[in-house]
Amino acid sequence: MTKYFSLKKYGHERGLSAAFRQWRADSHCKFLHGYSLEFEFEFGADELDEKNWVVDFGGLKELEVWLRSNFDHKTLVASDDPQFSEFELLNNNGIIDMVVVESTGAEMFAKMAMEYSSKMIQEKYGERCWVESVTVREHAANSAKCKRQN
């Protein structure tokens, strides 16, 4: 059986500039730092639509809106960060635009994007197609991927 896949990338040039820290790290990652993140979505289907597409890339505007609302000039803070109240103060004083997340790091950002995009694709296309994987790149050397479970 043939399977089809298509990729949609929101590259570093899109300016999804997010700051975060991994407070559990023993390395320099424990400090607040940021990247212009890149997100790549892989969509899969067993059959193409009437236009011979897996998904209509033009119909993914909702996905970019979600990416911007969560990663564009945002400071992502883990809900269990011991300095959470400090980040709240910065947010309340208009110094940062805080997004509270379960945990930080490319792996968790890929999981967040996988969960959101899978729900969105399911609503748009039903069972015909799915999100196969989401890759998040901090830069050319560091990335993480979340894959669909079969």
Image (cartoon, grey):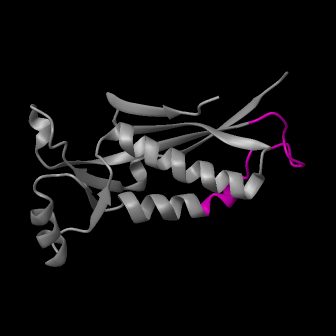
Q: Quick one: quadrant of the C terminus? A: top right
Residue 116 spot, x, y in % from top left: 53, 53
Give the side of residue 11 with respect to residue 79, left or right. right
- Is 97 positioned to the left or the right of 33 in the image? right
* Residue at 83% over, 24% down: 2
Residue ID at (67%, 52%) = 121
Residue at the (57%, 51%) spot, across then down = 117
Magenta stretch: dominant SS? loop
Total labels drawn: 0
Horizontal and vertical percent for residue 89?
12, 72
46 drawn magenta: yes
Query: 80 or 121: nearer the eye?
Result: 80
User: 23 or 28, which is in the foreground?
Assistant: 23
Q: Quadrant of residue 22?
A: top left
Q: Is residue 73 magenta?
A: no
Percent x, y of residue 16: 37, 55
Q: Is residue 109 left or right of residue 132?
A: left
Judged left or right of residue 100, residue 59 is right
What are the residue bounds of the magenta stretch?
A: 45-61
